[in-house]
């Protein structure tokens, strides 16, 4: 991959930075149940705390300007509670490594399918071969995880895959609509906070009052600020400067990072078959990287 211009360099730097951010987020989310917080609490932290920072910025920059109502609705829905609750629910069934595999590892494959359906972007032979390797490795990992880790691991894998569908849609639309970072934060954080927090406070089960302080602070900082602010800014910048194909492929390095951190921090182990499938997945990701001109910054 050529990284000649400054905008391309910062785009690749942003994409690789989010690899570490997402890998560690997998670990933090996997241990969230030990804090006593419910998945609804984690979602509330994600929107509520981030909106404390996002709301003044959105008001100052008038983030809604230039956005059509349908764009606000679509982006807010894609980054909304259904997506987040699916992901958090997945960690109740499957290891942290599977979160990286089935959310980030399949992103190039999902992006190709969406690009073909929505924009008639036909992938080349190289991308198709890489996608085939990704698909085979994902199937093997799902089967092996169910056989060796937990009989319910497939439920988590399915929930993670649904999350990948949402996330890939976000990456594609942020590029296609040329939505700015502050507009993404407005839709993904402020709009969802306004819609979700009253529902959570009035009707959804919560363990917030009884959660130990240290785990609560960890979840508050990482769920509240890292994904919805730092993550969205980095991904939006990378998607605009190096394109959604390269962004998705680099982000798909997260499976390896998640597997390594899961083994080092949580003591999770992968069978030899899963390790081989993870290697195959990585090869498929490298093959599927598309060389393309960046979008105007």
Image (spheres, rainbow, N blue to C red):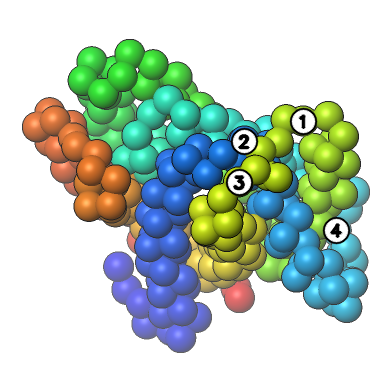
Mark on residue 211? 3
Tell me which label, 3 or 2, sits earlier in the chain: 2
Label 1 – label 3 distance at C-alpha: 16 Å
Q: Considering depth in this image, is 141 or 125 the residue closer to the camera? A: 141
- Residue 140 x, y percent position in the rendering: 23, 23
User: Cβ–Cβ below 8 Å for labels 2 and 1?
Assistant: yes
Secondary structure of the residue carrying numbered label 1: loop
Label 4 – label 3 distance at C-alpha: 39 Å
Image quarter for residue 222? bottom right
User: Cβ–Cβ below 8 Å for labels 3 and 2?
Assistant: no
Label 2 – label 1 distance at C-alpha: 9 Å
Q: Nearer the viewer, mark 1 or mark 3?
A: 3
Mark on residue 67? 4
- Which residue does the image show at 54% across and 30% down from the upper left? 89
**In the rendered image, is residue 288 in sight?**
no
Secondary structure of the residue carrying numbered label 2: loop
**In the rendered image, is residue 46 in sight?**
yes
- Which residue does the image show at 36% across and 77% down from the upper left? 3
**Quadrant for the N terminus in the image:** bottom left
Tell me which label, 1 or 3, sits earlier in the chain: 1
Secondary structure of the residue carrying numbered label 4: loop
Tell me which label, 2 or 4, sits earlier in the chain: 2
Label 4 – label 1 distance at C-alpha: 31 Å
Q: Which residue is mark 1?
A: 204
Q: Which residue is mark 2?
A: 38
């Amino acid at each position: 991959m050529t990284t000649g211009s400054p905008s391309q360099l910062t785009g690749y730097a942003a994409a690789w930075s989010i690899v570490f951010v997402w890998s560690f987020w997998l670990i933090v989310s996997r241990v969230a149940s030990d804090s006593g917080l419910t998945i609804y609490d984690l979602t509330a932290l994600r929107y509520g705390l981030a909106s404390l920072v996002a709301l003044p910025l959105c008001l100052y920059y008038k983030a809604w300007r230039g956005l059509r109502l349908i764009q606000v609705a679509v982006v807010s829905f894609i980054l909304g509670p259904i997506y987040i609750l699916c992901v958090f629910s997945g960690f109740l069934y499957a290891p942290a490594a599977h979160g990286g595999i089935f959310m980030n590892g399949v992103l190039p494959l999902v992006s190709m399918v969406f690009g073909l359906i929505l924009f008639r972007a036909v992938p080349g032979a190289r991308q198709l071969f890489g996608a085939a390797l990704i698909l085979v490795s994902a199937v093997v990992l799902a089967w092996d995880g169910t056989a060796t880790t937990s009989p319910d691991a497939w439920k988590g894998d399915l929930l993670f895959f649904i999350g990948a569908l949402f996330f890939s849609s976000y990456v594609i639309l942020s590029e296609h609509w040329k939505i700015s970072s502050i507009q993404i934060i407005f839709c993904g954080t402020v709009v969802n906070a306004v819609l979700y927090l009253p529902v959570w406070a009035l009707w959804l089960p919560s363990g917030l009052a009884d959660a130990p302080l240290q785990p609560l602070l960890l979840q508050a900082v990482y769920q509240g600020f890292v994904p919805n602010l730092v993550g969205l800014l980095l991904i939006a910048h990378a998607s605009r400067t190096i394109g959604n194909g390269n962004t998705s492929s680099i982000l798909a390095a997260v499976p390896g990072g998640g597997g390594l951190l899961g083994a080092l921090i949580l003591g999770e182990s992968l069978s030899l078959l899963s390790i081989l499938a993870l290697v195959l997945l990585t090869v498929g990701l490298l093959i599927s990287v598309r060389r393309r001109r960046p979008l105007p910054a």
